[in-house]
Protein backbone atom coordinates (compact mmCIF):
# COMPACT_ATOMS: atom_id res chain seq x y z
CA UNK A 1 0.00 0.00 0.00
CA UNK A 2 1.22 3.43 -0.87
CA UNK A 3 1.37 5.97 1.91
CA UNK A 4 -1.58 8.38 2.14
CA UNK A 5 -4.04 6.10 0.35
CA UNK A 6 -5.63 4.21 3.24
CA UNK A 7 -8.50 6.59 3.99
CA UNK A 8 -7.18 7.46 7.47
CA UNK A 9 -5.81 10.88 8.24
CA UNK A 10 -2.42 9.90 9.57
CA UNK A 11 -1.27 13.51 9.51
CA UNK A 12 -3.77 14.64 12.12
CA UNK A 13 -3.43 11.78 14.57
CA UNK A 14 0.34 11.85 14.14
CA UNK A 15 0.39 15.56 14.96
CA UNK A 16 -1.79 15.02 18.03
CA UNK A 17 0.57 12.33 19.29
CA UNK A 18 3.61 14.50 18.60
CA UNK A 19 2.01 17.32 20.60
CA UNK A 20 1.15 15.01 23.49
CA UNK A 21 4.69 13.69 23.61
CA UNK A 22 6.07 17.21 23.56
CA UNK A 23 3.60 18.13 26.32
CA UNK A 24 4.76 15.27 28.53
CA UNK A 25 8.37 16.39 28.06
CA UNK A 26 7.49 20.04 28.73
CA UNK A 27 5.53 19.22 31.91
CA UNK A 28 8.20 16.81 33.14
CA UNK A 29 10.97 19.37 32.61
CA UNK A 30 9.27 22.52 33.82
CA UNK A 31 6.46 21.41 36.12
CA UNK A 32 2.89 22.49 35.62
CA UNK A 33 3.25 26.19 36.44
CA UNK A 34 6.18 26.98 34.19
CA UNK A 35 5.13 24.77 31.28
CA UNK A 36 3.69 26.80 28.41
CA UNK A 37 1.61 26.04 25.33
CA UNK A 38 4.30 27.91 23.41
CA UNK A 39 6.98 25.59 24.80
CA UNK A 40 4.95 22.52 23.89
CA UNK A 41 4.40 23.88 20.37
CA UNK A 42 8.12 24.54 19.96
CA UNK A 43 8.91 21.00 21.16
CA UNK A 44 6.42 19.53 18.70
CA UNK A 45 7.51 21.79 15.84
CA UNK A 46 4.01 23.18 15.32
CA UNK A 47 2.24 26.51 15.73
CA UNK A 48 0.87 27.27 19.24
CA UNK A 49 -2.54 27.85 17.65
CA UNK A 50 -2.61 24.20 16.59
CA UNK A 51 -1.99 23.06 20.17
CA UNK A 52 -4.92 25.25 21.27
CA UNK A 53 -7.03 23.93 18.42
CA UNK A 54 -6.49 20.29 19.40
CA UNK A 55 -6.42 20.54 23.19
CA UNK A 56 -7.71 23.91 24.39
CA UNK A 57 -6.08 25.38 27.50
CA UNK A 58 -3.16 24.09 29.54
CA UNK A 59 -5.42 22.17 31.94
CA UNK A 60 -6.96 20.16 29.12
CA UNK A 61 -3.58 19.59 27.49
CA UNK A 62 -2.24 18.24 30.78
CA UNK A 63 -5.31 16.04 31.25
CA UNK A 64 -4.81 14.56 27.78
CA UNK A 65 -1.03 14.20 28.08
CA UNK A 66 -1.30 12.41 31.43
CA UNK A 67 -4.30 10.39 30.22
CA UNK A 68 -6.28 11.50 33.27
CA UNK A 69 -9.81 10.13 33.21
CA UNK A 70 -11.27 13.48 34.30
CA UNK A 71 -10.34 17.10 33.77
CA UNK A 72 -9.74 18.52 37.26
CA UNK A 73 -11.03 21.96 36.33
CA UNK A 74 -14.35 20.52 35.16
CA UNK A 75 -14.46 18.24 38.18
CA UNK A 76 -13.99 21.24 40.49
CA UNK A 77 -16.91 23.00 38.80
CA UNK A 78 -19.13 19.94 39.06
CA UNK A 79 -18.28 19.54 42.76
CA UNK A 80 -19.12 23.17 43.44
CA UNK A 81 -22.43 22.98 41.59
CA UNK A 82 -24.33 21.05 44.30
CA UNK A 83 -24.94 21.34 48.05
CA UNK A 84 -21.78 22.84 49.56
CA UNK A 85 -22.25 20.82 52.77
CA UNK A 86 -21.77 17.60 50.80
CA UNK A 87 -18.76 18.49 48.66
CA UNK A 88 -16.52 16.15 50.65
CA UNK A 89 -18.85 13.26 50.05
CA UNK A 90 -19.15 14.02 46.32
CA UNK A 91 -15.39 14.41 46.03
CA UNK A 92 -14.64 11.01 47.55
CA UNK A 93 -17.53 9.38 45.70
CA UNK A 94 -16.29 10.74 42.37
CA UNK A 95 -12.69 9.70 42.98
CA UNK A 96 -13.66 6.19 43.94
CA UNK A 97 -16.02 5.83 40.99
CA UNK A 98 -13.22 6.83 38.62
CA UNK A 99 -10.39 4.92 40.25
CA UNK A 100 -12.21 1.77 41.17
CA UNK A 101 -11.99 1.05 37.41
CA UNK A 102 -8.69 -0.72 36.77
CA UNK A 103 -7.77 1.16 33.58
CA UNK A 104 -8.12 4.60 35.19
CA UNK A 105 -6.38 3.36 38.28
CA UNK A 106 -3.27 2.26 36.43
CA UNK A 107 -2.64 5.74 35.05
CA UNK A 108 -3.12 7.19 38.50
CA UNK A 109 -0.86 4.65 40.19
CA UNK A 110 1.87 5.42 37.68
CA UNK A 111 1.47 9.15 38.41
CA UNK A 112 1.78 8.64 42.17
CA UNK A 113 4.70 6.24 41.88
CA UNK A 114 6.61 8.77 39.77
CA UNK A 115 5.75 11.61 42.14
CA UNK A 116 6.99 9.71 45.19
CA UNK A 117 10.29 8.77 43.57
CA UNK A 118 11.02 11.67 41.21
CA UNK A 119 11.30 15.35 42.08
CA UNK A 120 9.96 16.64 38.75
CA UNK A 121 6.91 14.41 38.88
CA UNK A 122 6.37 15.50 42.49
CA UNK A 123 6.30 19.15 41.42
CA UNK A 124 3.81 18.31 38.72
CA UNK A 125 1.39 16.49 41.01
CA UNK A 126 1.72 19.18 43.65
CA UNK A 127 1.14 22.10 41.34
CA UNK A 128 -1.60 20.44 39.40
CA UNK A 129 -3.70 18.36 41.78
CA UNK A 130 -3.43 20.57 44.82
CA UNK A 131 -4.02 23.89 43.14
CA UNK A 132 -6.01 23.13 40.02
CA UNK A 133 -8.40 20.80 41.75
CA UNK A 134 -8.58 21.10 45.53
CA UNK A 135 -7.36 24.69 45.56
CA UNK A 136 -10.13 25.77 43.18
CA UNK A 137 -12.75 24.13 45.35
CA UNK A 138 -11.48 25.65 48.62
CA UNK A 139 -10.95 29.08 47.06
CA UNK A 140 -14.42 29.12 45.49
CA UNK A 141 -15.99 28.51 48.89
CA UNK A 142 -14.20 31.56 50.23
CA UNK A 143 -13.18 29.94 53.53
CA UNK A 144 -9.98 31.31 55.07
CA UNK A 145 -6.77 29.29 54.68
CA UNK A 146 -7.86 27.96 51.28
CA UNK A 147 -4.36 26.73 50.43
CA UNK A 148 -3.86 24.87 53.68
CA UNK A 149 -7.32 23.34 53.29
CA UNK A 150 -6.50 22.23 49.75
CA UNK A 151 -3.31 20.55 50.92
CA UNK A 152 -5.13 18.79 53.77
CA UNK A 153 -7.75 17.46 51.34
CA UNK A 154 -4.94 16.32 49.08
CA UNK A 155 -3.24 14.50 51.99
CA UNK A 156 -6.36 12.44 52.76
CA UNK A 157 -7.21 11.63 49.15
CA UNK A 158 -3.62 10.73 48.34
CA UNK A 159 -3.36 8.52 51.41
CA UNK A 160 -6.67 6.86 50.60
CA UNK A 161 -5.55 6.16 47.05
CA UNK A 162 -2.16 4.78 48.08
CA UNK A 163 -3.67 2.60 50.82
CA UNK A 164 -6.58 1.32 48.70
CA UNK A 165 -4.95 0.89 45.30
CA UNK A 166 -1.18 0.65 45.71
CA UNK A 167 -0.58 -0.94 49.12
CA UNK A 168 -4.02 -2.61 49.02
CA UNK A 169 -4.47 -2.40 52.77
CA UNK A 170 -7.36 -4.58 53.90
CA UNK A 171 -10.18 -4.19 54.65
CA UNK A 172 -9.98 -0.69 53.13
CA UNK A 173 -9.02 -2.05 49.70
CA UNK A 174 -12.18 -4.12 49.38
CA UNK A 175 -14.64 -2.02 51.38
CA UNK A 176 -17.54 -0.89 49.14
CA UNK A 177 -17.18 2.64 47.81
CA UNK A 178 -20.34 3.84 49.60
CA UNK A 179 -18.95 2.92 53.01
CA UNK A 180 -15.56 4.51 52.29
CA UNK A 181 -17.39 7.62 51.08
CA UNK A 182 -19.47 7.76 54.27
CA UNK A 183 -16.34 7.40 56.41
CA UNK A 184 -13.93 9.69 54.55
CA UNK A 185 -16.35 12.24 53.06
CA UNK A 186 -16.83 14.09 56.40
CA UNK A 187 -13.04 14.38 56.78
CA UNK A 188 -12.75 16.09 53.43
CA UNK A 189 -15.78 18.25 54.18
CA UNK A 190 -14.25 19.50 57.42
CA UNK A 191 -10.94 20.24 55.68
CA UNK A 192 -12.79 22.19 52.99
CA UNK A 193 -15.27 24.21 55.00
CA UNK A 194 -15.16 23.22 58.68
CA UNK A 195 -13.22 24.34 61.72
CA UNK A 196 -9.55 23.37 61.38
CA UNK A 197 -9.12 23.59 65.15
CA UNK A 198 -12.41 22.14 66.42
CA UNK A 199 -11.11 21.41 69.90
CA UNK A 200 -9.77 24.96 70.17
CA UNK A 201 -6.32 23.72 71.16
CA UNK A 202 -4.61 26.69 69.53
CA UNK A 203 -7.18 29.23 70.66
CA UNK A 204 -6.98 28.01 74.26
CA UNK B 1 47.94 -3.33 67.02
CA UNK B 2 47.12 -6.99 67.29
CA UNK B 3 43.53 -8.03 66.74
CA UNK B 4 41.49 -8.55 69.89
CA UNK B 5 43.54 -6.15 71.98
CA UNK B 6 41.70 -2.86 71.40
CA UNK B 7 39.17 -3.16 74.20
CA UNK B 8 36.22 -3.32 71.78
CA UNK B 9 34.19 -6.45 71.40
CA UNK B 10 34.15 -6.81 67.61
CA UNK B 11 32.56 -10.23 67.80
CA UNK B 12 29.40 -8.98 69.44
CA UNK B 13 28.80 -5.95 67.22
CA UNK B 14 29.65 -8.02 64.14
CA UNK B 15 27.08 -10.63 65.16
CA UNK B 16 24.43 -7.94 65.76
CA UNK B 17 25.04 -6.52 62.28
CA UNK B 18 24.91 -9.98 60.72
CA UNK B 19 21.58 -10.62 62.45
CA UNK B 20 20.16 -7.27 61.33
CA UNK B 21 21.18 -7.94 57.73
CA UNK B 22 19.62 -11.40 57.88
CA UNK B 23 16.48 -9.84 59.39
CA UNK B 24 16.19 -7.30 56.54
CA UNK B 25 16.48 -10.14 54.02
CA UNK B 26 13.96 -12.30 55.92
CA UNK B 27 11.40 -9.47 56.20
CA UNK B 28 11.90 -8.44 52.56
CA UNK B 29 11.42 -12.01 51.33
CA UNK B 30 8.58 -13.16 53.57
CA UNK B 31 6.81 -10.02 54.76
CA UNK B 32 6.25 -9.29 58.42
CA UNK B 33 3.75 -12.04 59.21
CA UNK B 34 5.64 -14.97 57.75
CA UNK B 35 9.11 -13.85 58.82
CA UNK B 36 10.35 -15.83 61.82
CA UNK B 37 13.10 -15.40 64.39
CA UNK B 38 14.15 -18.92 63.44
CA UNK B 39 14.47 -17.90 59.79
CA UNK B 40 16.54 -14.86 60.71
CA UNK B 41 18.79 -17.00 62.90
CA UNK B 42 19.28 -19.51 60.08
CA UNK B 43 20.14 -16.66 57.67
CA UNK B 44 22.66 -15.25 60.13
CA UNK B 45 24.11 -18.64 61.02
CA UNK B 46 23.40 -18.21 64.73
CA UNK B 47 21.15 -19.78 67.34
CA UNK B 48 17.58 -18.34 67.59
CA UNK B 49 18.22 -17.73 71.31
CA UNK B 50 20.96 -15.26 70.37
CA UNK B 51 18.53 -13.30 68.17
CA UNK B 52 16.13 -13.13 71.12
CA UNK B 53 18.97 -12.16 73.44
CA UNK B 54 20.03 -9.21 71.28
CA UNK B 55 16.66 -8.00 70.01
CA UNK B 56 13.78 -9.51 71.97
CA UNK B 57 10.59 -10.25 70.03
CA UNK B 58 9.88 -9.89 66.31
CA UNK B 59 8.50 -6.35 66.71
CA UNK B 60 11.73 -5.11 68.27
CA UNK B 61 13.84 -6.95 65.71
CA UNK B 62 11.87 -5.30 62.92
CA UNK B 63 12.18 -1.89 64.57
CA UNK B 64 15.96 -2.32 64.81
CA UNK B 65 16.36 -3.79 61.30
CA UNK B 66 14.36 -0.96 59.70
CA UNK B 67 16.02 1.64 61.93
CA UNK B 68 12.61 2.91 63.00
CA UNK B 69 12.89 5.72 65.53
CA UNK B 70 10.10 4.24 67.66
CA UNK B 71 8.86 0.77 68.41
CA UNK B 72 5.23 0.69 67.23
CA UNK B 73 4.14 -1.71 69.98
CA UNK B 74 5.47 0.66 72.66
CA UNK B 75 3.99 3.62 70.84
CA UNK B 76 0.57 1.94 70.79
CA UNK B 77 0.77 1.37 74.55
CA UNK B 78 1.80 4.97 75.19
CA UNK B 79 -1.06 6.26 73.04
CA UNK B 80 -3.56 4.11 74.89
CA UNK B 81 -2.30 5.19 78.31
CA UNK B 82 -3.90 8.67 78.26
CA UNK B 83 -7.33 10.18 77.61
CA UNK B 84 -8.98 8.02 74.95
CA UNK B 85 -10.77 11.04 73.48
CA UNK B 86 -7.44 12.56 72.53
CA UNK B 87 -5.67 9.56 71.01
CA UNK B 88 -5.93 11.02 67.51
CA UNK B 89 -4.26 14.20 68.61
CA UNK B 90 -1.48 12.35 70.45
CA UNK B 91 -0.95 10.06 67.47
CA UNK B 92 -0.47 12.92 65.01
CA UNK B 93 1.55 14.93 67.53
CA UNK B 94 3.88 11.99 68.12
CA UNK B 95 4.33 11.23 64.43
CA UNK B 96 5.14 14.82 63.61
CA UNK B 97 7.57 15.15 66.51
CA UNK B 98 9.44 12.07 65.30
CA UNK B 99 9.35 12.77 61.57
CA UNK B 100 9.91 16.49 61.63
CA UNK B 101 13.52 15.51 62.48
CA UNK B 102 15.37 14.99 59.21
CA UNK B 103 17.28 11.85 60.26
CA UNK B 104 14.14 9.96 61.29
CA UNK B 105 12.32 11.25 58.25
CA UNK B 106 14.86 9.85 55.79
CA UNK B 107 14.37 6.30 57.06
CA UNK B 108 10.63 6.72 56.82
CA UNK B 109 10.72 8.24 53.34
CA UNK B 110 12.84 5.31 52.15
CA UNK B 111 10.31 2.88 53.65
CA UNK B 112 7.38 4.57 51.90
CA UNK B 113 9.19 4.87 48.57
CA UNK B 114 9.97 1.15 48.62
CA UNK B 115 6.43 0.25 49.60
CA UNK B 116 4.92 2.28 46.77
CA UNK B 117 7.19 0.75 44.14
CA UNK B 118 7.85 -2.77 45.43
CA UNK B 119 5.31 -5.45 46.28
CA UNK B 120 7.36 -7.05 49.07
CA UNK B 121 7.98 -3.74 50.79
CA UNK B 122 4.27 -2.96 50.44
CA UNK B 123 3.36 -6.16 52.24
CA UNK B 124 5.79 -5.31 54.99
CA UNK B 125 4.42 -1.81 55.59
CA UNK B 126 0.86 -3.07 55.42
CA UNK B 127 1.32 -5.94 57.82
CA UNK B 128 3.47 -4.03 60.21
CA UNK B 129 2.21 -0.46 60.40
CA UNK B 130 -1.47 -1.17 59.96
CA UNK B 131 -1.78 -4.09 62.32
CA UNK B 132 1.04 -3.72 64.80
CA UNK B 133 0.42 -0.05 65.38
CA UNK B 134 -3.00 1.24 64.34
CA UNK B 135 -4.66 -2.14 64.66
CA UNK B 136 -3.53 -2.51 68.26
CA UNK B 137 -4.89 0.90 69.13
CA UNK B 138 -8.28 0.32 67.51
CA UNK B 139 -8.58 -3.20 68.90
CA UNK B 140 -7.68 -2.10 72.43
CA UNK B 141 -10.51 0.44 72.37
CA UNK B 142 -12.96 -2.31 71.54
CA UNK B 143 -14.83 -0.31 68.89
CA UNK B 144 -16.44 -2.39 66.12
CA UNK B 145 -14.71 -2.54 62.74
CA UNK B 146 -11.27 -2.26 64.34
CA UNK B 147 -9.48 -3.36 61.17
CA UNK B 148 -11.29 -0.92 58.90
CA UNK B 149 -10.63 1.84 61.43
CA UNK B 150 -6.94 0.96 61.52
CA UNK B 151 -6.69 1.13 57.74
CA UNK B 152 -8.50 4.49 57.65
CA UNK B 153 -6.08 5.91 60.24
CA UNK B 154 -3.23 4.54 58.17
CA UNK B 155 -4.59 6.22 55.02
CA UNK B 156 -4.62 9.67 56.64
CA UNK B 157 -1.23 9.36 58.32
CA UNK B 158 0.36 7.95 55.18
CA UNK B 159 -1.13 10.73 53.05
CA UNK B 160 -0.03 13.37 55.54
CA UNK B 161 3.52 11.99 55.54
CA UNK B 162 3.74 11.78 51.75
CA UNK B 163 2.27 15.28 51.28
CA UNK B 164 4.37 16.92 54.02
CA UNK B 165 7.71 15.15 53.63
CA UNK B 166 7.95 13.62 50.16
CA UNK B 167 5.90 15.85 47.86
CA UNK B 168 6.36 18.82 50.22
CA UNK B 169 2.99 20.32 49.38
CA UNK B 170 2.75 23.88 50.66
CA UNK B 171 1.56 25.26 52.95
CA UNK B 172 1.15 21.86 54.64
CA UNK B 173 4.88 21.14 54.48
CA UNK B 174 5.80 24.20 56.53
CA UNK B 175 2.72 24.53 58.74
CA UNK B 176 3.72 24.25 62.43
CA UNK B 177 3.16 20.80 63.92
CA UNK B 178 0.62 22.13 66.47
CA UNK B 179 -1.66 23.44 63.75
CA UNK B 180 -1.42 20.25 61.69
CA UNK B 181 -2.16 18.27 64.85
CA UNK B 182 -5.21 20.40 65.61
CA UNK B 183 -6.48 19.95 62.04
CA UNK B 184 -5.73 16.25 61.48
CA UNK B 185 -6.04 14.90 65.05
CA UNK B 186 -9.87 14.96 65.01
CA UNK B 187 -9.87 13.01 61.72
CA UNK B 188 -7.81 10.25 63.29
CA UNK B 189 -9.90 10.37 66.45
CA UNK B 190 -13.11 9.85 64.49
CA UNK B 191 -11.59 6.97 62.53
CA UNK B 192 -10.47 5.33 65.79
CA UNK B 193 -13.51 5.77 68.00
CA UNK B 194 -16.16 7.87 66.27
CA UNK B 195 -19.10 7.21 63.98
CA UNK B 196 -17.87 6.01 60.58
CA UNK B 197 -21.15 7.04 59.00
CA UNK B 198 -21.94 10.30 60.83
CA UNK B 199 -24.38 11.53 58.22
CA UNK B 200 -26.21 8.20 58.34
CA UNK B 201 -26.01 7.80 54.57
CA UNK B 202 -25.88 4.04 54.79
CA UNK B 203 -28.41 3.76 57.60
CA UNK B 204 -30.87 6.01 55.76
Image (tube, coloured by chain):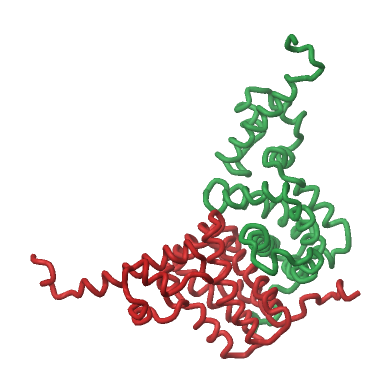
Chain colours: A red, B green
Determine which quarter of the picture holds residue B1. Answer: top right
Q: How many labels does the image show?
A: 0
Q: Is residue B193 visible in the rendered structure shown here? A: no
**Residue drawn at (70%, 51%) of the image:** B105
In the orientation shown, which residue stands out farthest toward the top? Answer: B2
**Residue drawn at (62%, 64%) of the image:** A159
Determine which quarter of the picture holds residue B186. Answer: bottom right
Q: Is residue B29 visible in the rendered structure shown here? A: yes
**Direction from residue A50 to residue A129 in the image, left or right:** right
**Residue drawn at (20%, 75%) of the image:** A9
Question: Which percent across, then down, holds residue A41?
Answer: 37, 72
In the image, residue B60 above or below residue B126: above
Question: Which percent across, then down, holds residue A75?
Answer: 52, 81
Question: Which percent across, then down, holds residue A1?
Answer: 8, 65
**Direction from residue B145 to residue A171 in the image, left or right:** left
Question: Which percent across, then down, holds residue B30?
Answer: 57, 40
In the image, residue A124 above or below residue B14: below
Q: Which corner quadrant holds the C terminus of chain B?
A: bottom right
Determine which quarter of the picture holds residue A2. Answer: bottom left
**Direction from residue B21 to residue A58 in the image, left or right:** left
In the orientation shown, which residue stands out farthest toward the left? Answer: A1
In the image, residue B125 above or below residue A171: above
**Residue drawn at (75%, 67%) of the image:** B175
Amino acid sequence: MAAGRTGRRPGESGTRDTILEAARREFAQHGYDRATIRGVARGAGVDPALVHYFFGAKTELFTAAMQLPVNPAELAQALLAGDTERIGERLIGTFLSVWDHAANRDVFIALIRSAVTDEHAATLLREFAVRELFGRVAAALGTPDAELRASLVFSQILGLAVARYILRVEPLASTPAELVTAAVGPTVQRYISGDLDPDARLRA
